Amino acid sequence: LWANNDAGSIFRVNINSEDTTDTDGASPVDDLYLNVTEIAVGAGHQLSTLVTPTGRSPLLLTHHATDQTVSVVNVDPAAPTFMTVTQTIALGIDNVPHGITFSPLNHHVYVGIERGPLALGVLDAADDALASHHMAAGVGVGQLPVGGPVAVDLSTHGDQPAGRWVFSAGYRAGIEGTAGQGYLSVIDASMANAVVEVVALGDARVGAIQISHLTVDNQ
């Protein structure tokens, strides 16, 4: 279990127990059960996502609003760099993050930028250096007007693979007393991160995106 701490660190709490159940029927508990490890990372408000690229060590990526960076922590127990920060990625000047998620379809990590010239930071987890493919904010066709909270749809139905749809929300403040404008954008990870839909939400700020999967008439 991983917990964010806006004071500049993250915590790992071991909730796994590998011992077999005792003969008296007691729950198995090993010496490291509930052991807490603190790892120093960047400064500012944090959000994290677990990244599991095929054929590579799993990673925990954490963004930092003050430093405007992303810390990369190796979380593979078999790796010599287990539970260490292996990389710190700069998002660029004045790009304040507030949202992070991962798509298993294209192995991209999406970092929502709520303030700055970028709308979405995109990192390729299939690349050792986590090469960036950032998306600038803009009002033109095929652009994201603004970024912020992000989420990936991990459902599968029909021929739709898990991780295809990426959702990004954001808010543009009004000028001189005028109302602001919120947006919800839809990105297709199977089409080189093409922005396929932008929905205007009116004067509404989205704090988080949650995806609910419902079955209707067995569809």
Image (spheres, helix red, strand yellow):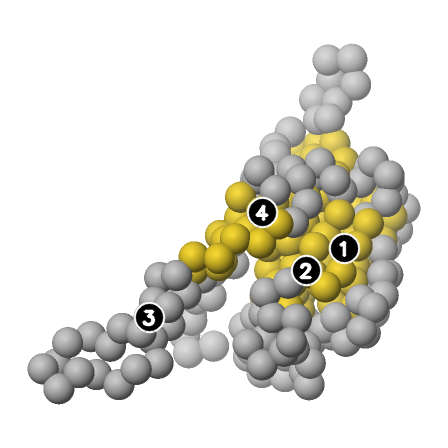
- Label 3 sits on a secondary structure element that is loop
Q: Which of the marked residues, 2 or 3, is nearer the chain's N terminus?
A: 3
Residue under circle 4? 9
Comparing 147 with 217, the one in front is 147
| Rendered image: mark on residue 85 | 2
Comparing 131 with 133, the one in front is 131
Q: Residue at x 43, y 57 (%)?
A: 36
- Label 4 sits on a secondary structure element that is strand
Comparing 3 with 142, the one in front is 3
The residue carrying pointer 1 sits among few (fewer than 14), some (14 to 19) or many (20 or more) residues within 10 Å by Cα, namely some
Q: Which of the marked residues, 4 or 3, is nearer the chain's N terminus?
A: 4
Q: Residue at x 17, y 83 (%)?
A: 22
Looking at the image, do the residues carrying marks 4 and 3 touch, with CB atoms under 8 Å apart?
Answer: no
Q: Residue at x 78, y 13 (%)?
A: 176
Q: CA distance from mark 2 to mark 3?
A: 25 Å
Q: Is residue 125 left or right of residue 58?
A: right
- Label 2 sits on a secondary structure element that is strand
Amino acid carrying mark 2 in the image: Val
Residue 14 percent coordinates (x, y): 41, 65
Amino acid carrying mark 1 in the image: Thr
Q: Which of the marked residues, 1 or 4, is nearer the chain's N terminus?
A: 4
Residue under circle 3? 31
